[in-house]
Image: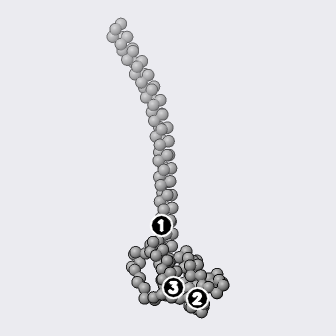
Amino acid sequence: MIDINRYIVNGLVKRDRIVSDIKRGRISKNEIIELDQHKEIKAAYFGNTNFEKIDRDLWNESYLDELSLAAVSETFCGEYLLYLNEVAQYVIAKDKKREHNNKILKEILVGIFVVLIILAIVLIVSAKKETVNYSVTKFELTKNMCFYFVKKLG
C-alpha cells in the first residue's frame, strides 16, 4: 500500500517526488496503478498520452533522465509513468548486473594477483637455493682451477 500523503502535500500533487521515486525503483508498477486510482493524482495529469517509445536496446541512464524530466514537465499521466517505471526497472537491473560483473572481475583479478605473488615467492626461494648451490659449485670450480694451475706451473 502506497502512502498517498507523501505525494499530495497541501492539496498539491508532488509530480517530481512521484517521478523521482519511480526512477529510483521505490515505486512498483502496482503502486503506480494504485496512484492512478486517486482522483487528486488523476486531476494532475497533463500532456500527450501518445508519446514515442524507443527500442529497449537503447534504454540507459541518460534516456531514463530524459523520461524523468519529461514526466515532470511535459507528460504526466498514468501510461507515461508506467513506461517510465519499465525503463527504470530495466536500467536498475542492468546497473546491478554491471556491478555484479565488476565485482566478479575484481575478485578474479585479486585471485590472479595472489597466485602471482605466491609464484614469485616460490621462484625467489628456489632461486636462492640455486644461488647457494651455484656458489658452492663456483667455489669448487675455482678451487679446482687453482689446483690445475698449481700442477701445471709446478
Locate residue 42, reporting x and y percent.
Answer: 56, 91
How many marks do you count on the picture?
Answer: 3
Q: Are marks 2 and 3 in contact (CB under 8 Å)?
A: no
Mark before the other along the chain sequence, 1 or 3: 3
Q: Are marks 1 and 3 in contact (CB under 8 Å)?
A: no
Q: CA distance from mark 1 to mark 2?
A: 35 Å
Quick check: can you spot residue 146? yes
Amino acid type assigned to the residue bearing label 3 in the image: Phe
Amino acid type assigned to the residue bearing label 1 in the image: Arg
Judge depth for marks 1 and 3 and give the one in front. 3
Image point 62% across, 82% down: which residue?
A: 7
Judge depth for marks 1 and 2 and give the one in front. 2
Query: What residue sits right under mark 1 in the picture?
Result: 98
Residue 81: image tag? none
Query: What residue sits right under mark 3 in the picture?
Result: 76
Query: What residue sits right under mark 2 in the picture?
Result: 41
Amino acid type assigned to the residue bearing label 2 in the image: Ile
**Camera-side residue of 34 and 20:** 20
Q: Are marks 1 and 2 in contact (CB under 8 Å)?
A: no
**Camera-side residue of 36 and 40:** 40
Q: Residues within 10 Å of mark 2 (few under 14, many from 20)?
A: many
Locate residue 49, reporting x and y percent.
Answer: 46, 89
Locate residue 25, reporting x and y percent.
Answer: 55, 76
Q: Residues within 10 Å of mark 1 (few under 14, many from 20)?
A: few
Quick check: can you spot residue 36? no
